[in-house]
Image (cartoon, grey):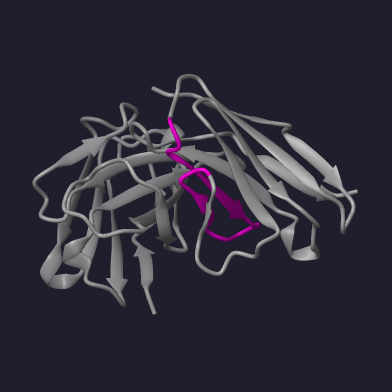
Amino acid sequence: EIVMTQSPATLSVSPGERATLSCRASQSVSSNLAWYQQKPGQAPRLLIYGASTRATGIPARFSGSGSGTEFTLTISSLQSEDFAVYYCQQYNNWPSFGQGTKVEIK
Amino acid sequence: EVQLVESGGGLVKPGGSLRLSCAASGFTFSSYSMNWVRQAPGKGLEWVSSISSSSSYIYYADSVKGRFTISRDNAKNSLYLQMNSLRAEDTAVYYCARPQEPGAAAAPNWFDPWGQGTLVTVSS
């Protein structure tokens, strides 16, 4: 099983600031990495797949980078609607998810 | 509009059984593999099971292997999860999730869209 580790667990950011979230895989997953956003009481929403490709309708302020074992999700200028929990998921092998990073208002 | 709607969740005693359903609409259901993903209260996401488009290939997480059975009915555009020998640790919201791209195989994939989820609570 590939273990995904996200950091930090909680990120406190002011609106308009940049947020950088990290995800590390226990072994290489190539670029087979997706990011999701989840708000309370809602299903996860796909943001990024292939490590860096934005899903349809996702604003350009969301960007993904990395390959192998180290990945980053960057939100360039946080909007009020971006405060949520973010999960990474590898699909190089049977899917596994990180434990999530909560982005909260500072 | 692509839609996935889960149903069948509820309260069940340890050792009991429950059958979840997922009704799909807005796309050619028979062209996609399908998945179940769960989320325990306040916890992260866990992939549970995948089924190929024609039901030829089926995969399970070790945590549910031998207790859960995934199935589908392409004529009814529906996905199912039969859950037996339920444990407290199976308590979770269960999501039906589709790969973004069509394909026959139940290969590892990313998920889009997801249903709204159905809550399963295992407690005496």
Residue lying at 26% horizontally and 50% vertically, measured from the top left: B81
How many marks are shown on the rendered structure? Answer: 0
The spot of residue A19 in percent (x, y) is 78, 46
In which image quadrant can residue B124 be found?
Answer: top left
Q: Which of A39 and B93 is in front in this view?
A: A39
Residue ID at (16%, 55%): B53
| Location of residue B82 in the rendering, given as x and y in whole percent from the top left corner | 23, 48
| Residue located at (55% from left, 39% from top) | B44
**Which stretch did the figure color magenta?**
A30-51
Left or right of residue A3: residue A37: right
Q: Is residue B65 left or right of residue B119?
A: left
Tell me where residue B75 appears, x and y as whole percent: 11, 71
Q: Is residue A64 above or below residue B54?
A: above
In front: A4, or B122? A4
Q: Which residue is drawn at 37% across and 74% down?
A: B2
Magenta run includes residue A95: no
Vertical arrangement, residue A22 with respect to residue B78, above or below: above
| Residue B103 found in image quarter | bottom left
Residue A7 drawn above or below residue B113:
above
Task: Give the side of residue A4 with respect to residue B63, left or right.
Answer: right
Residue B69 percent across, percent down from the top left? 20, 43
Relative height, residue B107 to residue B29 (above, below): above
